[in-house]
Image (cartoon, grey):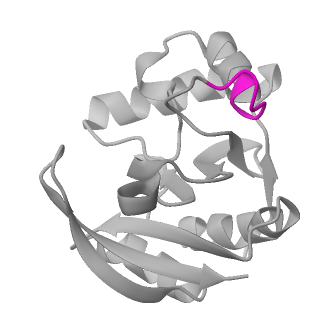
Amino acid sequence: MEEFLLIRPTGAYATQIAAYRQEFLVAGDSMDGTGPLRRMEDPEAYIKVCADYEDPKKVPPHLVPATQFLFIRKRDNRLVGTLQVRHRFNDYLEKYGGHIGYSVRPSERRKGYAREMLKAALPFCREIGLDKVLITCIDGNIGSEKTILANGGIYESTVHEPNNNEDLKRFWITL
């Protein structure tokens, strides 16, 4: 398997963050695990917001502290995925969103990157005091389900998320 870096967003990746966002918008795809990227055109502003979200004093009251990561392929320094670790739950995350959200850019899918990205994030989850993590995926998203299972995910239940009218499978990974 190739080598990757799991790093927090920095200005060095601003151009790639903008291109990553644009690729998702053109594909009409969801940007799971990107935090506020969909609504932010300015990558520098996005980088600042991501840093703010780590600080419990700066995160907006309707959100929870979270750490944003970029998944960078070392051989060409390309941003291939993003992952967000939420440090705790609010009511919505406890039912539907979980601790971790992630996505792989559309042009880089089906290469096993999501599996490696999730695996790389689990030690950080331990570092922030989590002993197990909840991850959800849309029922029928076979790729995401395989990613979660490959990292030790244990199926708990399927719930209906009314805002998006989607059924979500809930999995727990013990750290």
> Is any part of residue 2 visible from this angle?
no
Q: Is residue 148 left or right of residue 8?
A: left
- Residue 96 on image: x %, y %: 36, 58
Up-down: is 107 above or below 45? below
Tell which of 13 and 174 is nearer to you: 174
> Is any part of residue 85 visible from this angle?
yes
Up-down: is 15 above or below 90? above
- Residue 54 on image: x %, y %: 75, 35
Name which residue lies at 61% across and 28% down.
17
Q: Quadrant of residue 118?
A: bottom right
Q: Is residue 19 magenta?
A: no
The residue stretch that appears in magenta = 52-59
Q: Is residue 56 magenta?
A: yes
Q: Is residue 157 left or right of residue 172?
A: left
Q: Quadrant of the C terminus?
A: bottom right
Q: Is residue 36 left or right of residue 162?
A: right
Which residue lies most toward the left here?
A: 165
Q: Quadrant of residue 3?
A: bottom right
**Total residue callouts:** 0
Name which residue lies at 17% across and 58% down.
166
- Residue 114 on image: x %, y %: 55, 65
Q: Quadrant of the N terminus?
A: bottom right
Tell which of 148 and 131 is nearer to you: 131
Name which residue lies at 69% across and 30% down.
53
Up-down: is 114 above or below 39? below
